[in-house]
Amino acid sequence: MHLRLGLSAVLGALLVVAAPVAAYASVGVGVQAAPVQLAGAAHPGGTYALPPVYVVNTGTQPESVAIRIERISPGTGRTVPQAWIRVSGLPPPLGRGQSARIPLSLVVPSGARPGQYFSDVVVTGSAVLTAGGAHLGVAAATDLEFRIASGAVSAAWFTVPGWVLLAIVVVVVLAVAVVLMIRSGISIRVERATAGGAARNGGGRGP
Amino acid sequence: MGRKAPSQALSAAIIALAAVGAAGCGIKGAVPQNSGQAASVNLSLRTVPTIRSVTVSPASASFGNCEGGLASRNTQSTPGKLGFPNGHCFVGLLTPGFYPVTITNTGIASAIDVNGTSAYPSDGGVQWILCNRYGRGGPSCTHDGGRLPGKDQYLIENFSAAGEQSVGISGTPTCDPEFYASGHCWAVQGASQSEGIELIGPLVSTDTSTKWTMTITWTPVPTRG
């Protein structure tokens, strides 16, 4: 009985030691729990800046993070096509506990159907492979929500450079000043004084 | 009624005056002696973290304890190499229970999903596609009536002290059944599960590579309610 127990214990210990586990470091990634939402409605044909997504490395290994749009959590609305979300500027590899904010933008095609849209922003970490063929990965998801209202985005019908606007303002101010001067009756008389004229005036005063 | 109106107005006026007086008293008490100088109090507040995150340890593991295959064709599994047809290998052990992969919910309470990828050969050739038993949750395995992977297919099952998930991990993130013990793969902050992984290889592999890689990913996901 004792022999059997001892053999089992040794066998168990050997199995634990022999099990091909390569490393005991950890991989981890986190994302903001608050959903990524667009303030106000979007319109077909428009481009909108979404709030940047907060990501953090919760593991012990340096992580490069990637973002994809995939509907994996329950929610209502149309699924957001991956191509509508642009990720501008992924951060450099994050060390342990390091975080970053990743800017996102929403590019709505002109033919987009109005309504509520829903998907998930999935942040994926890429751990360094240390041994073997099995990669154990991590990801974290948060909701992505926005609404598309009907009607194309209103394009600016009249756009002028800033310096043109400034010039127009200056001209208007000058014009108003001139009008006010004329109405007030104030006149400015410009006279040119010449040397000859002065001498004649002086000669006229003599007896 | 006609007498009541003036008395009501008087009452209202008295109440209003009293209120003003009381408010005035309050203001007087609040104003410091050296009025005219601003005073401030610094306050600080700590909140609970609102991050959804997961940690998996170990970072990497390799398959071992392989079994199955056909000795007569010299394609039988060896302890560290998968054999054909339908050899199977383990990360950890079913019996005695050894579950080397620990998944910990390090963020707020979330559902824990798991998914796998295709297996990629080192020569970049034909992949093994992930299949599910009887098509439950993904493409159906095509051998033995849907029970085992067919040509260029493979199956991954995870197991823990809670049991083995026999349908197989799918290619899209779905609820990790090993977290079912807490109900609907729901994990509160700090909850963890130790798991092992079993891989069942294809009936036949088109690609002749002897080194394959695949990724298994755990994802905390928001839930409703």
Image: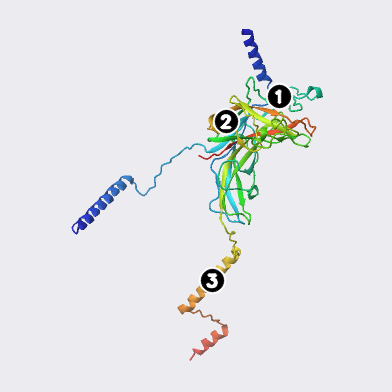
- Residue situated furthest left in the rendering: B3
Q: CA distance from mark 1 to mark 3?
A: 84 Å
Q: What residue do we see at 75% from left, 36% from top?
A: B127
Q: Position of residue A149 (x, y in %)?
A: 56, 55
Residue type at mark 2 is Phe
* Secondary-structure class at tag 3: helix
What is the quadrant of the N terminus of chain B in the image? bottom left
Residue highlighted by disc 1: B64
Subunit bearing disc 1: B
Residue type at mark 3 is Val
Residue highlighted by disc 3: A172
- Nearer the observer: mark 1 or 3; the answer is 1
* Secondary-structure class at tag 1: strand
Q: Position of residue A63 (x, y in %)?
A: 64, 36
- Nearer the observer: mark 2 or 3; the answer is 2
Q: CA distance from mark 2 to mark 1?
A: 24 Å
Identify the colour scheme used: rainbow
Q: Which quadrant of the structure image shows residue A122?
A: top right
Residue highlighted by disc 2: B179
